[in-house]
Image: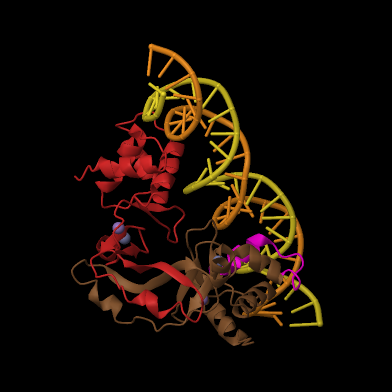
Chain colours: A red, B brown, C orange, D yellow
Amino acid sequence: MSTNNDELITAFKAKGYRITKQRLIILNALRNTATHPTAEEIYNMVKPQIPNISLGTVYRTLGALEELGLLQKLVYGGSFSRYDGNVNAHYHAVCLDCGKVLDVDEPVLSNLEERFSSETGFTIVGHKLEFHGYCKDCCKRKN
Amino acid sequence: MSTNNDELITAFKAKGYRITKQRLIILNALRNTATHPTAEEIYNMVKPQIPNISLGTVYRTLGALEELGLLQKLVYGGSFSRYDGNVNAHYHAVCLDCGKVLDVDEPVLSNLEERFSSETGFTIVGHKLEFHGYCKDCCKRKN
DNA sequence: ATAGTAATAGTAATCATTACTATTAAGGAT
DNA sequence: ATCCTTAATAGTAATGATTACTATTACTAT
Ligand SMILES: [Mn+2]
Ligand SMILES: [Mn+2]
Ligand SMILES: [Zn+2]
Ligand SMILES: [Zn+2]
């Protein structure tokens, strides 16, 4: 329920971007769910509050929020991307059956990135770790 | 240069799939490159050997090879997937600038998967780790 | 309140991937 | 080796998530 719009407002103003109802509502919707929704799911989540919002606006807003570091985009094997309002470093588990994405409550491996880099000349800015498997619901369904 | 077609032939016959020139050539092309090519890049790689091959055949073949565990599909932020003929567990580094994908010569974290799973009821079958950053060429270009 | 212009709604376009269909060619049987 | 069945291919059309376009709306500085 952390409706911390100040952070968004500051970040947007710093870039000369305007503060709009659409941007505030989309970011707050994303921060108040744990489901890692798709663009279309977000579109349906905010429709009650902005009945005539356009799907294009959702995509454009998500792009801007990503650019400002206020969300992270999750791209897995499926045909569409998911969005995560939690930008703290954390890992995910993806269900190979239903596509659900869960947060993994494991400490972040902070020492990984230094090992690589030197001999390859590759400058690392971060890493992503994802687990693949089957969620509780899908395991049940198979029995 | 490990043109080990026996492995492919065995795997395909076990599923009742037929052995075709297209499938042999595509898998061998994939095994003799370190570039993690896209479907279209593979299409261009095999065209000299199969001048009238269809891009659809490349996609269908890659799908079959993936299903048989003879390649892994790499999906990152970009607009297209990449394919890796090396199915041994290993990690990748993705350049945020040019999209290049490099193999990471680091040991696989085998103990990770057991930690999670029990309390969540999530059955893990594997994990993926990718580093993000800037390759040598792109670092140079920025100076 | 007004002016200037970035953002939006609505819609069309893009493009990687998948589906369709007539034709070809594996590969088992004879 | 030839025939037969049918899976796989080539060529092409369709799909669908995402992006681009454009007239209109609404932030925000003055
Ligand atoms: Mn998350
Ligand atoms: Mn690789
Ligand atoms: Zn599931
Ligand atoms: Zn690069």
Q: Is residue A10 above or below residue A132?
A: above
Based on the picture, tell me whether residue B68 belongs to the magenta stretch: no
Residue, x 44% and y 58% (percent of image)? A78
| Left or right for B48, reference B82 | right
Q: Which quarter of the figure is the N terminus of chain A placed in?
A: top left
Q: Position of residue A102 (x, y in %)?
A: 28, 60
- Range drawn in magenta: B47-64
Expressed as whole percent of the image width and height from the top left, the position of residue A93 reads 31, 65
Q: Is residue A89 left or right of residue B93?
A: left
Horizontal side, residue B57 vs residue A33: left or right:
right
Residue A45 visible to an observer of this rendering: no
Residue closest to the eye, B137 or B130: B137
Total label count? 0
Residue B11 image offset from top left, x and y in percent: 53, 80
Q: Nearer the viewer, residue A71 or B43?
A: A71
Establish if B70 lies above or below A15.
Answer: below
Q: Residue at x 49, y 71 (%)?
A: B67
Question: Quarter of the image holding residue B46?
Answer: bottom right
